[in-house]
Amino acid sequence: MHQQPNQDVDLTNCDREPIHLLGGVQPYGCLIATSSDFMINHVSENVQDILGLDPTEVIGGRLLDVLPEQTIHDLRTKLQLLNIATNSSRLFGYDVLGNGTRFDVSIHAQSQKYIFEFEPKLDTQHRDDMSLVQPLLARVKRADDVGAACDQAAMAIQALSNFDRVMVYKFHDDGSGEVIAERKQQDQEPFLGLRYPGSDIPKQARELYLRSVLRLISDVDGDVSPITPKTSIDGKPLDLSLAVTRAVSPIHLEYMRNMGVAASLSVSIIKDGALWGLFACHHNTPKLIDFERRTAIELFAQFFSYELARKMDIAARQEDENSRRLHDNLMVKLSGGTNLVNGFEVIAEELSSLIPNDGIAVFSDGQYAARGEAPSETEFHKLARVLNTAPAAQVFSTDRLVNIYPAVETSDADIAGLIAVPISRTPRDYIVFFRREIAKSVRWAGNPEKPFEVGPNGSRLTPRKSFEAWSEVVRNSCSKWSIGELNTAEALRVSLIEVVLKLTDEANEARQKFADKQELLIAELNHRVRNILNLIQGLVSQSRSEATDLASYTSVLDGRVQALARAHDQLTTTEWSPSSLRTLINVEFSAYMAGQHERLVITGDAPMLAPEAFSTIALVVHELVTNSAKYGAFTDHSGHVAIDLKIGPDGSLAIKWREIGGPPVKAPTRQGFGTTIIEKTIPYELKGKVETRYLLSGFEADIMIPSTSIAAEQETVTQAPVTVPQQPISSTVTLAGDVLVVEDNMIIAMDASDILSANGASKVHMAGSVGVGLSIIDANDISFALLDVNLGDQTSLPVANELAKQGIPFVLATGYGDAESITAQFPSALVISKPFTSEALQSAIRKTLE
């Protein structure tokens, strides 16, 4: 990297270095990049040495022409998983060439290309590296705090990697990093406690650490194998962001050499989606760890990130709990009438227990009191003018007061930082916590002011060569206020304003809120009365159309108005809170069939209806009971009604209404207002569903009421429901058919199942073998099937033959490149290649069914 003579030079220039486009790979692996149809676009030149492939011969050819067919099939299967689970797939100890030579393989997709990396297997003996992770993680879990957990994690990474030095490197808010835990060889100089400037790890490198969490540099002096061709046909270099063998920036290699490091391993520690830190590993000689062991290290780091977040959350909760307890004690004292200024000495100790400080002051209603390191009243008035410029109703904090109030340097008080807690809105009153200056000594790994050196060719950016501990004294700062202390200050602000002080503006606001609430209640009452009047008007109008004479009109209208009245009585009894559906049904039933409760059977759950939905459901229940009494099961002494109530996992309510033992029923010749109420009001007003059936065995209705109309709690049923002999309740007929997926990879089968369900399948059966697939066909009415041609040690041919024999349409899926020869023995069917997309499968289904 060279700079213009007049250009400022520092390590931030590295932020512009395209470290993901370096055009080469490290010597321990080779790379093949293909298009989405497996045409070879790029290779690293060392494919000749590692895979025996001539780079000049394979570019532009098919991957199927250079690797065995079984290898292509397995690579395609792994690619299918990229769409489901992760951004990369891996194969360990795999016979890529079919000649017994084992490789570890990494596969990922990047910019519409597939990138395959092959590393010769270092140790062909059977190992179970993943089994090492759990016992090492258990040691981390037993650690008492975050610091101890980091120590155990450094020990674990060293055990897994066998690197000379392993550090836990934590990023600070300013971008710099600090070594907070370390494991090293006895003769090595310790780096524990050293700080490194943010420029040591450029911005784009940090972004890559989030995407690719493990990075191995096996030999700083190793030969780089170039990518050929250097650019694609559109002139763009190959993006190696996720490539595990990606070459290394020359600047970073020089940085490592300056540190005396020959090999390194970096593993990201990610918390809440952000880069919290790194495991930074150094080795004095070149060192290669195979891909399988690196994957175990990566897995450990991921689990450590979860455990780190858990321990930090536990510590934060404990801090919050302690602060809450102290806060509550303070509130008790203040609620007893203790004045902030007059009783300042009484409460100052409680306040200091909440937020550690070197001085504390209160300014309220023009009065000032202070103790410890705090400014005089005259000085505070000047400081308050600065604090008044901060946003209203917010806690303000700083650990460098001199930056906003330079006059603090001449103050008699030794203060360098503060937390200001506003305890009123107008005028501004405060409780202020102060802290003294701490002349901190920060130990840097080399002088952070000299991140580069001027070389013989001018301002060529060169990483520093000195990493000896370099101390910097930081003045005019106090110890940083923690997040927990700031949260405590905010809780204190809210409590003092809204609970204790009861200032005039707060009281006026409370009175205004009460007036607004009263006005809202009046408006709501007016709205409800108007709605009821409009509903009665509609009932009067619509009931007229189905009445044959005045008497029947009066009877129908009276019944509906009474149903509304009973619903209103039930609502007012519960003070307009959720009301019992069982009670509603029983009350409505009693109006028609008093003394015959054995003819009504209610089973299942005991839902409570939201007040807004109660009147609507009351009208529907009334019409159902009325129709049963007029035309259905209640017209003679033998029939009864069975009602099953079921609350689903999503909170919705399913109602099954079954009339049994009454006279035969038939659908009405015209749709009256009563039928309209039953079938239309719940879908229209509550966005639910209603299905009705007029069967010879009796009337049936299935009703679904969304969760928005159902209360979360259920009614406690004190009496068991009355039971009578029941006939089987007929179920509704579903229009969607059952579908079969035969696939030996469970994740791919689940993915295909999701696609088929989204395209209308009512139930998807999954089978991982021929035997299971045939048994599913024998036991179910299968309407369509998706078959993976190769099922490991067998093919799906027997399943395909059975499907063809029964005339069931199906589609074949295969990862083999030559699909025609592979499926030649199969019955005629469309074939889709892995990895398949949702659109490809949809197209195949459509063509097959046509």
Image (cartoon, grey):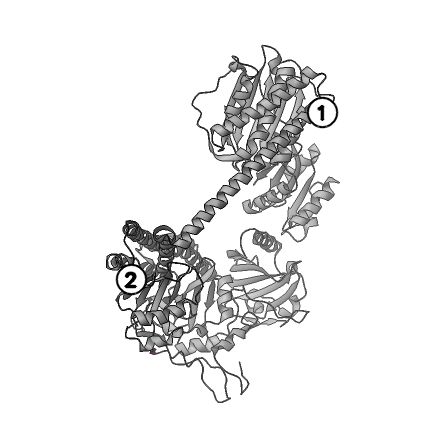
In the picture, residue 49 is in which quadrant? bottom right
For the residue marked with disc 1, what is the amino acid? Answer: Gln
Mark 2 Cα shell of 10 Å, populated few (<14), some (14-19), many (≥20): some
Quadrant, the C terminus:
top right
Magenta stretch? Answer: 457-471
Q: Is residue 480 visible?
A: no
Where is residue 380 shown, x and y percent of the image? 33, 69
For the residue marked with disc 2, what is the amino acid? Answer: Pro
Q: Is residue 271 visible?
A: yes
Task: Identify the element where label 2 is drawn.
Answer: loop
Q: Which residue is mark 1?
A: 671
Q: Is residue 696 above or below residue 106?
A: above
| Residue 653 or residue 91, whichever sits in front | 653
C-alpha span from label 2 to label 1: 76 Å
Task: Identify the element where label 1 is drawn.
Answer: loop
| Residue 525 or residue 781, whichever sits in front | 525
The answer to whether residue 60 is magenta is no
Residue 103 in the figure: left or right of residue 739: left
Q: Is residue 255 above or below residue 713?
A: below
Residue 342 in the figure: left or right of residue 784: left
In the picture, residue 846 is in which quadrant? top right
Name which residue lies at 71% across and 34% down.
807
Q: Is residue 701 above or below residue 519?
A: above
Name which residue lies at 54% across and 52% down.
85
